[in-house]
Image: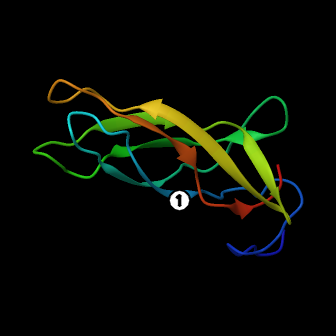
């Protein structure tokens, strides 16, 4: 396969790609945490799509941070040979509360 850059439009799946995201948690106990994330490479699914695994910590805020481990949803084509993934998960409980995180990651080449 020819070399594929982050802005290239591609039909099908691009092996070894990942996605970045910058998001905020839900507000709990009067504060939010920023989550800066890069996913694992793709994990093939039986239906010919793929998902990604992610793991990390929300940025330290209000005297603590939260850990998370999650899998994305399947690839969502967004046109022009690019796709994104939806995610929806909860962080670990710290300081008596946890946060909800949901959203869409940055587009990557491939439409599957």
Q: Nearer the viewer, residue 51 or 43?
A: 51
Write the residue at 82% across / 49% down: 112
Q: Which of 62 and 13 is in front in this view?
A: 62
Left or right relative to 26: residue 14: right
**Quadrant of the image occupied by residue 22:** bottom left
Residue 56 x %, y %: 36, 45
Q: What element carries label 1?
A: strand
Residue 92 x %, y %: 30, 29
Residue 59 x %, y %: 26, 52
**Quadrant of the image occupied by residue 19:** bottom right
Write the residue at 53% across / 34% down: 88
Write the residue at 82% across / 70% down: 9
Most extreme residue toward the left is 63
Residue 20 x %, y %: 53, 59
**Quadrant of the image occupied by residue 101:** top left
Residue of label 1: 20
Position of the N terminus, as image quadrant, is bottom right
Q: Which of 58 and 52 is in front in this view?
A: 58
Whether 61 is drawn above or below 95: the answer is below
């Amino acid at each position: 396969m020819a070399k594929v850059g982050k802005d290239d439009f591609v039909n099908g799946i691009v092996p070894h790609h990942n996605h970045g995201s910058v998001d905020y948690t839900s507000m709990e106990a009067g504060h939010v945490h920023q989550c800066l994330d890069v996913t694992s490479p793709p994990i093939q699914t039986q239906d010919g799509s793929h998902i990604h695994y992610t793991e990390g910590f929300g940025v330290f805020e209000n005297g603590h941070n939260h850990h998370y481990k999650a899998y994305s949803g399947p690839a969502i084509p967004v046109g022009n040979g690019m796709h994104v993934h939806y995610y929806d998960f909860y962080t670990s409980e710290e300081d008596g509360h946890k946060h909800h995180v949901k959203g869409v990651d940055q587009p990557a080449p491939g439409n599957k």
